[in-house]
Image (cartoon, rainbow, N blue to C red):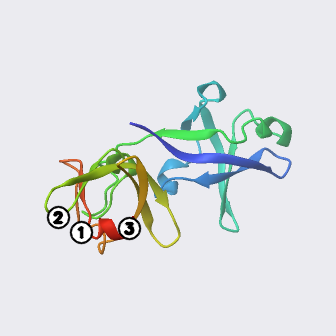
Amino acid sequence: MLLVVGRIGRAHGVRGEVTVEVRTDSPNERFKVGEFLHTEPQSRGPLRIQSVRDHAGTLLLSFEGFDDRNKVETLRNTLLVADVDPTASNISNDDFHISQIVGATVVDSEGKVLGVVDDVISLPAQDTLVVKADGVEVLVPFVKAYVPAVSIERREITVRNFEGLR
């Protein structure tokens, strides 16, 4: 499955490096010298990684064929896409890939359908589910206190205190 693993930001320096907004829990697996990444839009890639380095907590990449600031600036805001097996990335039963969550049915403890997960927002404190319920978006903190059960097989998420979140 092709999934977005990063977004190219601004150029860094004059030798063709760019900052990357990382959108993966496994940057060391996704961003390796010599690896190819698909792009969105497709017309900008694929890109072969030439160098990878950390600069004060910011990932910097350079790509073959983009050896100066002007060339690499044309890639700004390009999404980097990798072929990822979401089931292989789960570390424990409480780890999920966003693609496994989006579209899941949200139910209460009695099994009553409340809505559908429309998106997952990654916030510093915790991930937050964006649930479409009766045409309204409801934000649900993705923590055990509100989300006691997730069934990837049934594509179902059980929430508690849903009415208190509206």
Which x, y percent locates residue 94?
28, 64
- Please indicate whether residue 129 sits to the left or right of residue 124 in the image: left
Q: Nearer the viewer, residue 36 or 117?
A: 117
Q: Quadrant of the N terminus?
A: top left
Which x, y percent locates residue 81?
52, 39
Task: Assess disc 3: are there few (<14), some (14-19) or many (≥20) residues with their C-alpha within 10 Å of its C-alpha.
Answer: few
**Amino acid at the residue labelled 3:** Leu
**Amino acid at the residue labelled 2:** Ser
**Separation of marks 2 and 3 at Cα, in angstroms:** 15 Å
Q: Secondary structure at mark 3?
A: helix
Q: Quadrant of the C terminus?
A: bottom left
Task: Assess disc 2: are there few (<14), some (14-19) or many (≥20) residues with their C-alpha within 10 Å of its C-alpha.
Answer: few
Which x, y percent locates residue 79?
60, 40
Residues at badges 2 and 3 in contact (C-beta under 8 Å)?
no
**Mark 2 vs 1, N-terminal side:** 2
Q: Nearer the viewer, mark 2 or mark 3?
A: 3
| Residue at 31% in and 61% down | 91
- Please indicate whether residue 129 sits to the left or right of residue 75 in the image: left
Please name the residue that numbered disc 3 is placed on: 165
Q: Nearer the viewer, residue 112 or 2?
A: 112
Residues at badges 1 and 3 in contact (C-beta under 8 Å)?
no
| Residue at 86% in and 48% down | 14
**Amino acid at the residue labelled 1:** Pro
Q: Nearer the viewer, mark 1 or mark 3?
A: 3
Please name the residue that numbered disc 1 is placed on: 148
**Separation of marks 2 and 1 at Cα, in angstroms:** 9 Å
Which residue, as the protein is rendered here, is positioned at the far left? Answer: 110
Which x, y percent locates residue 38?
55, 33
Task: Assess disc 1: are there few (<14), some (14-19) or many (≥20) residues with their C-alpha within 10 Å of its C-alpha.
Answer: few
Q: Nearer the viewer, residue 47 or 10?
A: 10
Q: Secondary structure at mark 1?
A: loop
Residues at badges 2 and 1 in contact (C-beta under 8 Å)?
yes
